Amino acid sequence: MSRLLLDVGKLESATAAGDRPEIRACVTRARLSLRAALGSAGRVAIERTETYSLAGRLYWSLGDEKKALRWWERSIEEGERLAARPELARTHLEVGRRLAGSEKLWGLDAAQHLRRAHDLFVELELSWDLEQLEPIERARGADAQCGDGRRAAVTLARA
């Protein structure tokens, strides 16, 4: 799974930089890593929540929002079922930073996902994760005042 995390991170960086040859290489590596991680997650339950969340990030980076949302939904379901609260909180953070406007996943809009992530981070005393969440919450608050949720989700997805 660590390989998948690395490959998805590299893909996101290459996408932000607009490096087409690197994007193609990263997509190939990330898809292979995903296949391996899903195989492992099938055997090791504790890895499922994070693996499914990373699959969501991969598909979001590829522009397949529908598939990304399905993977995040699976991640939330597994996180709830397995009580994998740190990874569940991180999945809520990923969803919250990417949902736009009135879109919902698992019955929650972006602000509610961010609130769930915040509450879990505080409860679990995950200060590093809270620090990652703060600029997103500030940006969401500013964009909510401007009323441009769609633009905010695109901006935050690259943060």
Image: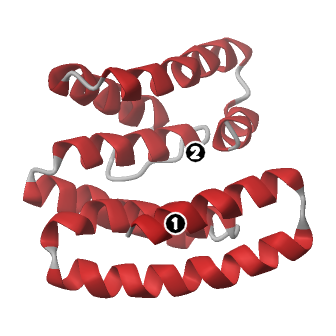
Precedes in sequence: disc 1 or disc 2: 1
Q: Give the alpha-carbon distance from disc 1 to disc 2, as whole Å.
A: 10 Å
Q: Is residue 146 visible?
A: yes
Picture mark count: 2
Q: In this view, does 36 lie above or below 154?
A: below
Residue 46 image position (x, y, % from top left): 16, 64
On the rendered structure, is 103 left or right of 105? Answer: right
Q: Quadrant of residue 62?
A: bottom right
Q: Position of residue 93 (x, y in %)?
A: 42, 39
Residue at the (49%, 80%) spot, across then down: 33
**What residue is drawn where x is 47% and y is 39%?**
96
Q: Residue at x 60, y 37 (%)?
A: 101
Q: Residue 139, labelled with which disc? A: none
Would you say 78 lies left or right of 70 here? Answer: left
Tags 1 and 2 in contact by the CB under 8 Å rule?
Answer: yes
The image quarter containing residue 60 is bottom right
Specify few, some or many for label 2: CA neighbours under 10 Å numbering under 14, 14-19, or 20 or more. Answer: many
Residue 122 sits in quarter? top left
Instruction: Please give the residue where the numbered disc 2 appears in the rendered image.
Output: 98
Q: In this view, does 47 lie to the left or right of 62?
A: left
Amino acid type, residue under disc 2 in the picture: Arg
Amino acid, disc 1: Ala
Residue at horizontal 25%, vertical 69%? 48
Q: Name the residue under label 1.
A: 68
Q: Dot 1 surroundings within 10 Å: few (below 14), some, or many (20 or more)?
A: many
Q: Where is residue 147 in the image (x, y as percent from the top left)?
A: 70, 21
The quadrant the C terminus occupies is: top right
Image height of 90 relative to 70, above or below: above
Q: Is mark 2 on a helix, strand or loop?
A: helix
Colour approach in the figure: secondary structure
| Numbered disc 1: secondary structure | helix
Q: In this view, does 74 lie to the left or right of 104?
A: left
